[in-house]
Amino acid sequence: MGEPIVRYENVHKSFGAVEVLKGINLDLKQAEKVAVIGPSGSGKTTIIRMLMTLEEPTSGEIIVDGKNLWHMEKNGQLVPANEKHLRQVRGDIGMVFQHFNLFPHMTILENCMTAPIHVQKEDKKSAKERSIEMLEKVGLGDKLGNYPSQLSGGQKQRVAMARALVMRPKIMLFDEVTSALDPELVEEVLEVIRDIAHEGRMAMVLVTHEMEFARDIADRVLFLDGGVIAEQGSPEEVFGNSENKRLESFLRRFRR
Amino acid sequence: MQGINITITVLIASIVCGYLTAFIAGFCRLSNNIILRKLTGLYVEVFRGTSLIVQLFWLYYALPILFGFDLGSDFWAGVLAISLNYGAYMSEIVRGSILSVAKGQTEAATALNMSSFQRMRLVIFPQAVRMMLPEFGNYLIQMLKATSLVSLIGMTDILYYGDILRSSNLSQAPTVYLLVLIFYFILALPLIFLTRKMEGISKKGVASG
């Protein structure tokens, strides 16, 4: 599969005096699907937020497609990245949030087509066509002119996915995307993610509490505990019979 | 009644300059530049903390004497005093509204690889403006009432003519001031209506939390 598309090198992250991540080393291969599980507060979300440039690592490096994300070279020295550099490197990354974060003052269609037009400088007509296509794909072709406030949680999350997908990312990050949904709306969102995953082109990192789902679509599962990757392997290995006591007790809570 | 046109022109000029001041000062207070932030902060506190009448007298009477700096006319002295004063109050609304747009909005815009300027222009500001509208409407009405102060620097607005009428016939004072009240209220009506409308607009399309 060649070079990893994302590499974490000994990444640490502290919030104030609390060290949440204590040295993360991770390679994400192209088109690989990785599920991140673990107790709340273990730093799962922080891992992908640092990749999306929403959170700056305290130390360590994140390499995206061969380029250092948080540092750039200046006169032969590594200096903290400026916005221009961040924008160059994060262009291939998309993210879907737990609380959707749709733009409430825009219609569904505008939510999707704004970034392609303004960020990628795509012409309006093709951005609109692709946005409509994408919204149809997630089953919302009849809601184009609606505002986010008129949609259910599941529909909002599907819009959020369409919005991220029209940017044609190579890496998609999913931050507990079903946690804020009513139970009966979870499936429609997972269905869309499953479809995207089966198309196979994108690398995906899913922070999730849906163990069944993680087992279903992930190539690899990471168990995060105490600020480090405590266990990782194929879904069979991790969900099967792991020796790790903490992982065992974590998984037991989901088996009831 | 004469004087209405003066009141209205002072009001309109104050509204335009006042909102302009509010936006400029509001953005300056959010700037990364600490000097700019502190200076605007000082301006806001000084103008909020002192009386509008005194500010008006300063601009009209004191400035020309102290610095030889003449604003040229009572009109601009009045407009400037009102817009600087209300601009200071409203800059706080601008600042507060921008800060209160949910953090997730900035994050979503970042995830779509927008620059910080695009985030502000496309995502944050349009939502913040909706939050500003109701408060802005209230200040609109207050500005109308503040225009009556320009009669004190000799401008011939509604109140000025009311005063003249009264002094020519003291027994008419209640009728005259009743009339003045009615005039102000009639002028305020469209503003009140506008405020309602703005509140309606602002209810739609804002992310909170």
Image (cartoon, rainbow, N blue to C red):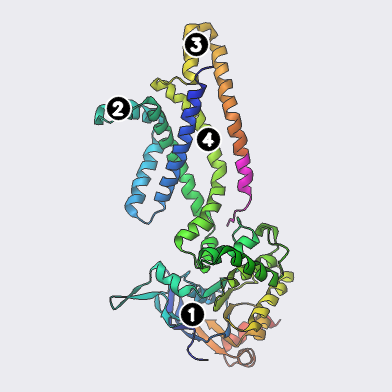
Which mark lies nearer to you, 1 or 4?
A: 4
Numbered disc 1: secondary structure? loop
Q: What type is the residue that disc 4 sits on?
A: Leu
Tag 2 and tag 4 share a subunit: yes
For mark 3, name the chain: B
Going by the numbered disc 2, the residue's amino acid type is Ala
Residue B68 at x, y = what percent?
25, 29
* Residue A35, percent from left and from top: 59, 82
Which residue is under mark 4?
A: B140
Q: CA distance from mark 2 to mark 4?
A: 28 Å
Residue B34's place in the image compared with A203, above or below, is: above
Residue A100 seen: no
Mark 3–mark 1 Cα distance, whole angstroms, equals 81 Å
Q: Which residues are magenta?
A: B197-209
Q: Quick one: label 2 or label 4, which is nearer the N terminus?
A: 2
- Real-space Cα separation, disc 1 to disc 2, in angstroms: 65 Å
For the residues labelled 1 and 4, the Cα–Cα distance comes to: 54 Å
Q: Is residue B95 above or below residue A31?
A: above
Using a 10 Å C-alpha cutoff, classify the residue at mark 1 as few (fewer than 14 neighbours), some (14 to 19) or many (20 or more). Answer: some
Please give the chain letter of the residue carrying mark 4: B
Residue highlighted by disc 2 = B62
- In the rendered image, which residue does mark 3 sit on? B165
- Please, what is the three-letter code of the amino acid marked with disc 3? Leu
